[in-house]
Amino acid sequence: MTLRSLDLFCRVVDNYGDIGICWRLARQLRREHGLDVRLWVDDLVSFRRLCPQVAPDADTQLIDGVTVRHWRDQDGVYTAADVADIVIEFFACDIPPGYIGAMAKCAPRPVWFNLEGLTAEEWVEGCHRLTSPHPRLPLTKHFFFPGFTDKTGGLPREAALESERLAFQSDPAAMTAFLAGLGVAGPELAATRVSLFCYPHAPVAALFDSWRQGGEAIVCLVPEGVAAEVVQAFLGAPPTAGAAATRGALTVRVLPFVPQPDYDKLLWACDLNFVRGEDSFVRAQWAGKPFVWHIYPQDENLHHKKLRAFLQRYASALPALEQVSLAWNDAAPADGQGDWPARWHAFRAEMPQMAARAEEWRQQMLANGDLAANLVRFAASLR
């Protein structure tokens, strides 16, 4: 039986990462696999910052071919006719009990996935595609893990992403026009361009001081609302979109929060990208540029284990990248704190090797296939 419809349930925990991943996936499943996709989201306000077409007060709306439903609560009465052929709960969010009950009444029953968060830890290879029978109902859930090897579901990537990136990066006029739209023009175009997307606890002030006192012109492009206190202190003015200031060798420029396609272009146009969470982390890998990851913090510093697992895979031959990444995430050993000017100096010297590694890594990830295609193929095999 052909799989025609898909429901994707998303609770927004990390303001933009969760919905960023789910929105990309929903559009790709619609465009490239022809599925009738409904995206259930509990926070439409955060969603709107990534997708300006979103009406935050609408219960149901159609955007880019995807039906967006406002997931208000766990109540509601559902029938088998309301259930999609494929049901995905993102990152173990609890979908409404009434919906699960309706799933059990379907014939055939839907393919049910828990789409997990991304990690480089080795254990995911053994858990990818594992089953979890429902304790009371005749339903089976499958765990599906994105990842960095061919024993996982791979990374999210649209079919046209590579050709779009290459076309943009090989067109200097297009890149200049894009940057000009963000206020980057004149001498700033010749500076080292850095995008900065991080959580509030990142040591941004120390990094800014290193750049400001250095001998290399750097333009740091920061989305509005990111590192707001440090950016305001640097600017000496409110960190609103369009604000900019130069202190020493560093220019900080505040950008509006851009839609996802423009964020990809920002990554492609910069020499170095600081990214956070999962969505921008993955997009930085497809950009093929040096990047530093700010991982989502977890209790008892469990995120440090995940960070080290990724660095072991990605940066084993890049000591400066490893040191900056650990310090950026407050995971450096007490005797390895060092000072940021020295750390940045070593990092900057290593950037050519990072660029080569980024391209090598991108080719490795391409060989694993993309998450959406791998998921649809597995769902079809279950039916």
Image: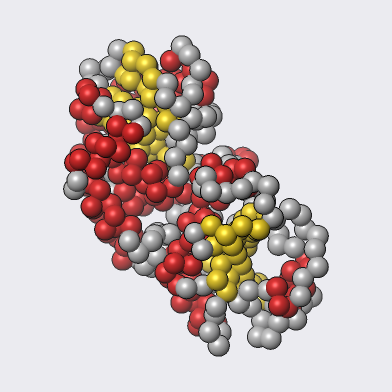
Query: As displayed, is residue 331 above or below residue 376?
Result: above
Task: Using residue 112 as the reference point, say whether residue 328 is left or right of it.
Answer: left
Task: Using residue 204 as the reference point, say whether residue 144 is left or right of it.
Answer: right
Residue 36 lies, in percent from the top left, at 55, 71
**Residue drawn where x is 45% and y is 44% of the image:** 259
Task: Using residue 171 as the reference point, say whether residue 119 is left or right of it.
Answer: right
Which corner quadrant of the image does residue 67 belong to? bottom right
**Residue drawn where x is 50% and y is 27% of the image:** 227
Query: As displayed, is residue 101 above or below residue 1?
Result: above
Q: Is residue 122 visible?
A: no
In-front residue for pair 23/93: 23
Residue 365 lies, in percent from the top left, at 33, 60
Which corner quadrant of the image does residue 104 belong to? bottom right
**Residue drawn where x is 45% and y is 33% of the image:** 256
Quadrant location, the C terminus: bottom right
Q: What number of labels is visible?
A: 0
Colour scheme shown: secondary structure
In-front residue for pair 127/234: 234
**Residue drawn where x is 61% and y is 57% of the image:** 61
Quadrant location, the N terminus: bottom right
In-front residue for pair 370/150: 370
Residue 343 lies, in percent from the top left, at 32, 26
Residue 374 lies, in percent from the top left, at 44, 71
Q: Is residue 159 visible?
A: yes
